[in-house]
Amino acid sequence: MGRVLADLFKKRGPVRTIGVIGMGYVGIPAGALFAKSFEKVYGFQRDSSSSGYKINLLNAGKNPLKGEEPGLDELLNEVVQKKKFECTSDFSKISQCDAVTIAIQTPFLNPTDLIPDFSALEEGIRQAGKYLSEGSLIVLESTITPGTTANWAKKILEEESGLVAGRAFGLAHAPERVMVGRLLRNIQEHDRIVGGIDDASTNRAMELYGPVLTSGKLIPMTATAAEVTKTAENTFRDLQIAAANQLALYCEAIGINFYDVRKGIDSLKGDGITRAILWPGAGVGGHCLTKDTYHLERGVKIADEQSVDFPDGVESLYVTARHINDFMPMHMVHLLKKGLNRSGKKIKGARVALLGWSFLANTDDARNTPSESFYLLCMEEGADIRVHDPWVTNWPGIDVSQDLESVLSGVDAVVIFTGHRMYYQLDSHKVRELSGSSRCVIIDGRNVIDPDVFIQNGFIYLGIGRGDKNSHPI
């Protein structure tokens, strides 16, 4: 069967035209880079009320993503001007594509039931199957439950196309490995995991991604191994963050500075020594880390293999890490209450400035932002919350302001949730003047301000991991 597909790829010739389904944080930079290296790229985007606006913007060479994204504006304009990139809602043009990548979000509506919402991904896969032609390649870039490519996705593509995967068309998983704020760089420099359902699919996918890489290497494996690789690497990062968060909570309880401890741990270096430790914070957000643990856990449960040999009565280490990271917005509420209590106030009726709505510094990416969890918890407590973010201009049901001074005016407390560059420059005198309070509370969830400077200017300071400062004399 593999030989038949390999011959079809050879007959079709080299990859020239590429389709990218999903014009988001992954699809847009990927499409632009493909257009730089190949003859033609179609970016497929539904003309919906929420996202249809991207079509005209992209076809004008304009980047719909906000925030700092080095090189993307220039590259988009270049490939559009050269007529190598076109965004369209006409999915029938998939029939013209030698390869089609699909990058669509795969959230969990309720992580505890381990059932992902694949509805949007399914729509994209069905569109690809409906129009795919013999000898084409379909690549899933979305992070998915292990086993999805070779089973669920394969079945849908075959149903829609009437063709057989591995014989008439290729199918692979090549997970994205990008961080907002460095999209182009990540796609070009990170090694690319490529897993086909067979050798012919893997080899064709390597032809697709090879020209885009600058310093990154291609790492071939099976489709399911690629799915496990992606979910596991994000699970491990989430685990590392949870370890830092738990240590920060310990340092607060003991009354010491987490950052001193971290520096000490990090100083141990040598052959075979690995003591890497990440940073604690107000919570973990984004589309990946908040869900990929559950994809990995689900993959184990649905695999038609032997059961996992694991200690009885012990919850998954990875799921426990998720619970710790999900707890951090609540911890921020606890710090806020403690600070307000020291200032002689209660959280009910307190005026609070929440600084940062995106989950990632210097971007507009607010998917699964921990700021929202904190906001809702404070609203339940009766607090009056104002939100500031320099990049996020709107959010359903939330008034997000770009006017920092108005948000800080007359507040009882300032809570820093995102490490935006501008928050590092907060002036204690100016903030105190705007607040109008001699005992304004400031809660630092990202270690962006110097506590001593604010304490000396009359603030009541509390910060994650700052047990040495959280009970400072007033």
Image: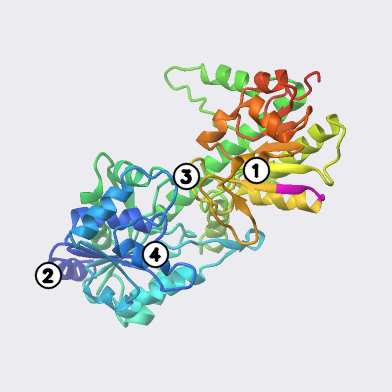
Q: Residues within 10 Å of mark 3 (few under 14, many from 20)?
A: some
Q: Position of residue 226 (x, y in %)?
A: 39, 53
Q: Which residues are magenta?
A: 381-385
Q: Which dot, 4 or 3, sits closer to the camera?
A: 4
Q: Which dot, 2 or 1, sits closer to the camera?
A: 1
Left or right: 29 as drawn, with respect to 332: left
- The mark that comes first in sequence, 2 or 1, is 2
Look at mark 3 in the image and give the residue it sits on: 233
Quarter of the picture containing the C terminus is top right
Q: Is residue 265 above or below residue 406?
A: above
Left or right: 413 as drawn, with respect to 117: right
- The mark that comes first in sequence, 1 or 4, is 4
Q: Residues within 10 Å of mark 4 (few under 14, many from 20)?
A: many
Look at mark 1 in the image and give the residue it sits on: 406
* Type of the residue with mark 2: Lys
Look at mark 2 in the image and give the residue it sits on: 11
For marks 4 and 3, give the CA distance. Answer: 31 Å
For marks 1 and 4, give the CA distance. Answer: 31 Å
Q: Position of residue 393 (x, y in %)?
A: 53, 53
For marks 2 and 1, give the CA distance. Answer: 64 Å
Q: Secondary structure at mark 3?
A: helix
* Type of the residue with mark 4: Lys
At x 18%, y 66%, the residue is 6
Q: Quadrant of residue 306?
A: bottom right
Left or right: 255 as drawn, with respect to 181: right
